[in-house]
Image: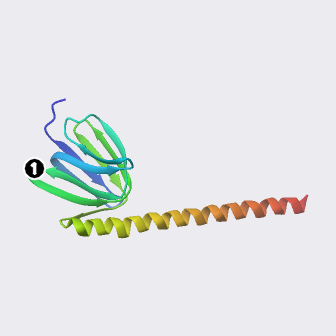
Amino acid sequence: MSYKYMTLNIMTPEQKRTFEGVTKIIAEAQNGSFCLKPRHIDYVAALVPGILNFVEGETETFIAVNTGILIKQANNVLISVRYAIEGDDLDDLDRVVQEEFYVLDKKEQDTQIALEQLQADFIRRFVELQKIRN
């Protein structure tokens, strides 16, 4: 494997962005941050909300990403996330991650708990109804 560059595709439900000539990608997974370079072995990681940055030519780009998955195969890297917001100001991007992405995850967790409680209540009432019928 003698790759000099990677092709980075970042996909959200709304759009796909492609970056050519990428020489370094830094992202954050559940067990910490990691760096990928063109000659890195194939790799898969579950991403957590954080700041993704990569170098394309002489330009370093920063993107706030929500949870998702990163797959590196040969010189192609695919990142699929729910939300991705590009920006120049790291403080603003960090605020987006802290305030918006974590809030979304919390709301989703609360919704999941409410659904599970509704399901448990439904099953309990169904069992009680079966007992009354018998």
Which sits in the foreground, 80 or 61?
61
x%, y% of residue 19? Answer: 19, 51
> For the point 28% across and 65% down, which residue is it?
94
Left-right relation of 107 to 93: right
Quadrant holding the N terminus: top left
Quadrant housing residue 113: bottom right
> For the point 87% across and 59% down, which residue is it?
131
x%, y% of residue 106? Answer: 47, 65
x%, y% of residue 58? Answer: 8, 52
Q: Mark 1 Cα within 10 Å, few/some/many (few <14, many 20+)?
A: few
Residue at label 1?
57
Left-right relation of 130 to 17: right
x%, y% of residue 40? Answer: 23, 36
Q: Residue furthest right?
A: 134
Q: Residue furthest front?
A: 32
Q: What's the amino acid at mark 1?
A: Gly
Q: Residue 31, relative to residue 64: is it above or below?
A: above
**The residue tagged with tag 1: helix, strand or loop?**
loop
> For the point 54% across and 66% down, which residue is it?
111
Quadrant housing residue 99: bottom left
- Tell me which colouring the rendered structure shows: rainbow
Q: Residue furthest top?
A: 1
